[in-house]
Image (cartoon, rainbow, N blue to C red):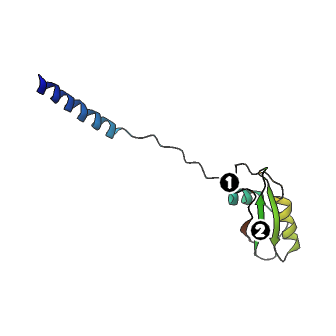
Amino acid sequence: MKTFKLALLLVAFAFSLGASATTTPKKKKKKKAQTIERSIGRLLENPKFNLKRDIDTSVYLIVNSDNELVVLNVESDDYEVETWVKLRLNYKKLDFDFAKKNKPLRLPLRMVSR
């Protein structure tokens, strides 16, 4: 009787291992990670002016405690680009909770003429 119980236990154990190994796990939907670069990219889409040439610049900013962008400086030779970037970004709320608040950030910005 003891061997029968042991054999039955081994069969049940082997069956449970086989059943768990053959089940397919549910696929999780991947969300696109919210990044400050993507948020700024969306805010800077579709400028209302024409660029004469490609512009490479840097934007210095911080995210304040209210989760708003605060532009500190825009390194650009073109005054129109500088004011446009400041108008589009300054005090705009981020749609996600940014972890590095009140720390200065430098983001490279490339604007391509079309």
Q: Amino acid at mark 1?
A: Ala
Residue 21 percent coordinates (x, y) = 32, 40
Labelled disc at residue 59? 2
Q: Which residue is mark 1?
A: 99
Q: Would you say 34 lies left or right of 57 here?
A: left
Image position of 95 with respect to 69: above or below? above
Q: Would you say 69 lies left or right of 38 here?
A: right
Looking at the rendered image, the quarter that the C terminus falls into is bottom right
Residue at disc 1, secondary structure: loop
Give the residue displayed 83% in from the left and 59% down from the top: 88
Check disc 2: other Cα within 10 Å, few if <14, some if 14-19, many if 20+.
some
Residue 85 occupies which quadrant of the picture?
A: bottom right
User: Mark 2 or 1 closer to N-term?
Assistant: 2
Image position of 99 with respect to 22: above or below? below
Q: Nearer the viewer, residue 76 or 69?
A: 69
Q: Amino acid at mark 2?
A: Val
Residue 96 percent coordinates (x, y) = 70, 49
Disc 2 to disc 1, C-alpha distance: 19 Å
Residue 78 percent coordinates (x, y) = 85, 75
Among all residues in the image, which is located at the extreme top? 1
Labelled disc at residue 113? none
Residue at disc 2, secondary structure: strand
Whether residue 35 is visible, yes or no, is: yes
Whether residue 44 is visible, yes or no, is: no
Check disc 1: other Cα within 10 Å, few if <14, some if 14-19, many if 20+.
few
Give the residue displayed 72% in from the left and 67% down from the top: 107
